[in-house]
Structures are given as C-alpha cells and as structure tokens.
Amino acid sequence: MHKLLLALTCSVALLGAGAARAAVDAKAAEDSAKKMKCAKCHLPAEKKKGGGPPVKDISAKHKADKDAVGKLSAKVMKGGDDHPDVEGGTEADVKKVIEWYLSQ
C-alpha cells in the first residue's frame, strides 16, 4: 500500500512539473526574446559561430533541473563573461524566455 501511495505521489508531482512548464505563454516569451535579442546568440537548432548554445541544447541540459529557471535567470541577469548584459529586458522577461526555452 505504501509503495502504491509513493508511486502515485511521484506521478502527480511529475505531471504537475510538466504542466507548469507546458503553461508557458509562448507568444509572450517569444516577444520578450525578440526584445532582448536572445536569437543573436541562441538559435533554435544549430550553433551560430561565436554564439551561445542553441535552445535545444539549453533545454536538454537543464530540463530536469527544477531550479534551472532561477539559476539561469540569475546568470543571465548578472551578465559578465558567461553571458552578455540583457538588452532591454526585466528579470521577469528573462524568466519567461528561459521557461519557454526549457519547454522546447
């Protein structure tokens, strides 16, 4: 009985996490990504010479990390060597784009 309850609890938690990522407003996130010029470095499928990792690589690397949105948005907002400064975006915009990237 305990094993069944544990399995059900884990299943609901995993479904909830997937639903939260699936609930991303893709249009709003895409608009934010355009505003901040994310595609200058992050393309959907292939690497751009001298640019950042493609969206599919970001998603594959961080999709299972429940703290990925917070970690990546902090890195992006900080700027510096690992990531250039965000152009015209707020922390909320950055998080929206990262959630969108991770949903792909």
Image (cartoon, rainbow, N blue to C red):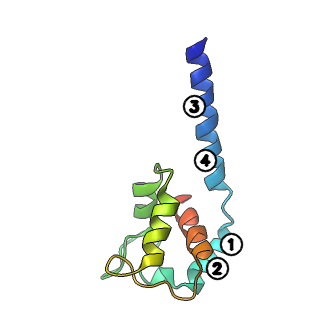
- The residue indicated by pointer 2 is 31
Residue 42 visible from this viewpoint? no
- The residue indicated by pointer 3 is 10
Q: What is the three-letter code of the residue carrying label 4?
A: Gly
| Whole-percent x, y for residue 49 in the image | 31, 81
Q: Report how far apart the C-alphas of labels 2 and 4 lie in the structure.
A: 23 Å
- The residue depicted at 65 percent of the width and 52 percent of the height is 20
Mark 1 crowd level (few <14, some 14–19, many ≥20, 10 Å Cα): few
Q: What is the three-letter code of the residue carrying label 1?
A: Lys
- The residue indicated by pointer 1 is 27
Secondary structure, mark 4, is: helix
Q: Earlier in the sequence, mark 3 or mark 4?
A: 3
State the image quarter where residue 96 is shown: bottom right
Q: Report how far apart the C-alphas of labels 3 and 1 lie in the structure.
A: 31 Å
- The residue indicated by pointer 4 is 18
Contact between labelled residues 2 and 3, with CB atoms less than 8 Å apart = no
